[in-house]
Amino acid sequence: PSQASVSEVKARRLAESVGLKDYDHLEPCRIYHAARLVAILEAYSLYDSEIGYCQGMSDLLSPIISVVEEDHEAFWCFVGFMRKARHNFRLDEVGIRRQLNIVSKIIKCKDSHLYRHLEKLQAEDCFFVYRMVVVLFRRELNFEQTLCLWEVMWADQAAIRAGIAKSAWGRLRMRAPPTEDLLLYAIAACVLQRRKLIIEKYSSMDEIMRECNSMAGNLDVWKLLDDAHDLVVNLHDKI
């Protein structure tokens, strides 16, 4: 509510200061947030000149600026976030390919029939989930669902840093051991939920990619997390 009440004068002043274009159709609060995105992403491109700015970074930053009202705090939150996510934007795509390979392994271990069908379509590299990996499901989930998924992911990573994953007590208390790769298990779960459709109806990787890109707004984040945790329980040691 406090951010929605931004005055038009304040919003337009900030938009002009960062050189924002074509914003007359937006409400003042949206102008203000768009201008904040530009300012923080420009600052990040200077801070991390090796990566710079890449398409998709705005998807990762927008949830942060919605809950962090001070730009300098939002910037450093984004810097911390990008320590984990910056490999998604490397030109050599080494980080992306590593993650796609893990998704492929999860599917292969869980459902050999689906995997063979993907091999037949020359889609076993799982390139059709590329966007999900790069922007961490941001375009497939709505805003509230995104925060749910990300916070569960971060909780897993925090548990690992705290050493909980290594303790017998931790494994006994938790249904699924924490993993650095919960996002990838969720992506695999998303594909596996559509296994029947993929096997029976799709005959090319492009068709599967269109199906993945059409998921926006049609996913149940809690079912997704349940299925992802089931995969972690059954496959974590194998992967």
Image (cartoon, rainbow, N blue to C red):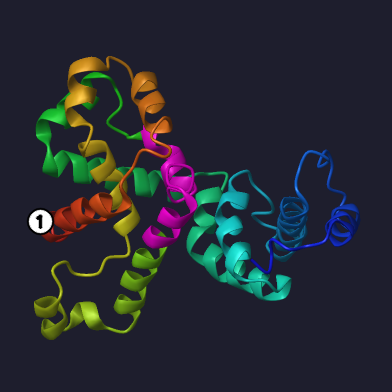
Is residue 226 highlighted in magenta? no
Tag 1: residue type? Asn
Write the start and end of the magenta stretch as one range. Answer: 127-149
Give the residue displayed 36% in from the left and 27% down from the top: 211
> Whole-percent x and y of residue 112?
11, 34
User: Left of 75 or right of it: where is 116?
Assistant: left
Does the rendering let one see residue 226? yes
- Up-down relation of residue 85 to residue 71 (above or below): above
Is residue 133 highlighted in magenta? yes
> Whole-percent x and y of residue 192?
21, 38
User: Left of 128 or right of it: where is 24?
Assistant: right
Q: Which residue is mark 1?
A: 234
> Whole-percent x and y of residue 219?
33, 42
Does the rendering let one see residue 239? no
> Whole-percent x and y of residue 199?
18, 22
Which is more toward the observer, 84 or 208? 208
- Up-down relation of residue 207 to residue 37 (above or below): above
Quarter holding the C terminus?
bottom left
Considering the whole magenta stretch, tell me its main secondary structure.
Answer: helix
Q: Secondary structure at mark 1?
A: helix
Dot 1 alpha-carbon crowd within 10 angstroms: few under 14, some 14 to 19, many 20 or more: few
Q: Quadrant of residue 49?
A: bottom right
Give the residue displayed 19% in from the left and 30% down from the top: 195
